[in-house]
Image (tube, rainbow, N blue to C red):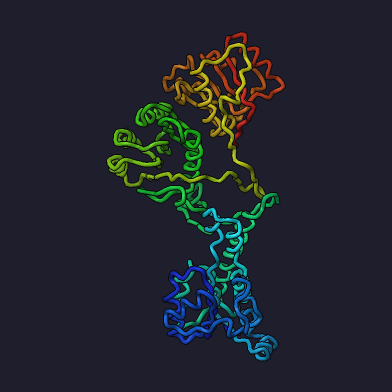
Amino acid sequence: MKSTKQAKSALISVFHKDGLTPIIEKLKELNITIYSTGGTEKFIREKGIDVIPVEDLTSYPSILGGRVKTLHPKLFGGILARRNNNDDLSQLDTFEIPQIDIVIVDLYPFEKTVASNASEEEIIEKIDIGGISLIRAAAKNYQDVLCVSSMDQYQEFLEIISNTNGKTTLEQRKLFAAKAFAVSSHYDTAIFKYLNKSEVVFRESFNSVKKLRYGENPHQEGYFYGDIDALFDKLHGKELSYNNLLDIDAATNLMLEFSNDIPTFAILKHNNACGLAQRSTIKQAYIDALAGDPTSAFGGILIANTEIDLETATEIHSLFCEVVIAPSYSTKALDVLKGKKNRIILVQKNTSLPKTQYRTILNGVLFQDKDNKTDSKDVVKTVTIQKPTNREIDDLLFASKICKHTKSNTIVLVKNKQLCASGTGQTSRVDALQQAIEKALHFNFDLEGAVMASDAFFPFPDCVEIANNAGIHAIIQPGGSIKDQLSIDFCNEHKMSMLFTGTRHFKH
């Protein structure tokens, strides 16, 4: 069997006509017979190019409002017939079925229709039946047929037939077949996700992929599957790396907690906040966030919840940082920030992030709802005799938001809406607290009057005792230990206040 095939016929049925004109012109030039139907046939005819209507081949018109156009043995027989199988070829002759060597399909835009908030009836009508069937048939028979399954492949296909005068190799046809099944599987996944309301089945698919410089380390390959452009406009700087993207994800999710608040600035390193402050101006918020840990801020990710102005940009410019993220920048601020060639500058768009998350483990996938619960005044409960002041409550809730986005085990120390320090990713909660205290004192914070947040309950009163000795007299934690009363009793004996949230915020 010859691996190189000369195309003599093509079936074209596409939704998007952009980029199709050069293809049909080239097919005409190569004397390749074109079959088509519906809007595609009309488009080709209007270009002055000969086309055979599918109805002439099948002797059936388009029926059921266009739901059935291409579903016919005279089409699928011509696509699926094995050219090296004499019985198949004999049946083509018997039933007067022409061989079809090229199939070009572009499916109805199901995902875009869903995203447009169209009615269910409109969405269902955008489930392509004939097109997806043509793609699968042509891809299955890649030994003899080349399948173009998306408008994204038009240019590559055009280059092939232009360079070879309509000949295709087995390698090329197999490559396009793989792409075709990627298109069909992604399409089916999108439909399943729209229709599914209760079936606990993991299905995910991304058409967009970006090769990264490397993965977590230079010896690892890395890719990003997704549409980063839907979330950010990149204005300046080098290409985003694997680690940049991990930190940007952490920064974005953290700042969502403060999206509607007064000016707030955060600095992150290795997915954790090393500085965060809320002030009347974004400049002061940045200055006080940086004071939380100016050492770790080196090479960090910076994010603001409001526009970055010239004064703030001037302060930032003296710091080496990988990425700056904000909803907008003043023109003069951008001029300053662009002064560092590699500094990545992102504008965050007003779009929603997924409400679920997953990660690969062992030979499978862990899937869960995101921790979308934020502790607030209406859910917390004072469990001690001493009640926190209004200022302390504000700081406690502020600390709780940071705690929720910090690696466990974690302790977060806050004073006057400023992150003083945190203990992150420790195997012992006591170690996390001692790390936070030591770090805060190292950067000259006075912890008298500071508050403490914990991502999980205290099984013993040791943490509240250490906190009290450091000058911390207000604590927020989930509660739920069988020994909660020991911590409560210690607080009562030392005039400390404690709030229970009822919600654990582990982040592993």
Q: Position of residue 215 (x, y in %)?
A: 50, 50
On screen, 486 above or below 348? above
> How far across and down, in percent of the image, does residue 208 sit?
51, 57
503 is higher (above) or lower (below) than 224 = above
Q: Residue furthest front?
A: 65
Left or right: 130 as drawn, with respect to 261: right
Residue in the picture at 55% in, 76% down: 103
Q: Please, is residue 437 above or below residue 149 in the view?
A: above
Looking at the image, which residue is at 35% across and 46% down? 342
| The N terminus lies in quadrant | bottom right
Residue nearer the viewer, 347 or 411: 347
Task: Please provide percent x and percent y for residue 222.
Answer: 51, 53
Task: Report whether 44 appears left or right of 357.
Answer: left
- Left or right, 462 with reference to 7: right
Query: In the picture, residue 290 is in which quadrant?
Result: top left
**Quadrant in which the C terminus appears:** top right
Q: Is residue 317 shown to the viewer in this render?
A: yes
Snapshot quadrant of residue 140: bottom right
From what the image shows, is residue 148 above or below residue 248?
A: below
Q: Residue at x 48, y 56 (%)?
A: 210
Q: Nearer the viewer, residue 426 or 234?
A: 234
Residue 42 position, x and y percent, is 48, 77
Q: Quadrant of residue 186?
A: bottom right
Residue depicted at 60% across the width and 59% down the height: 121
- Residue 135 in view in this figure: no
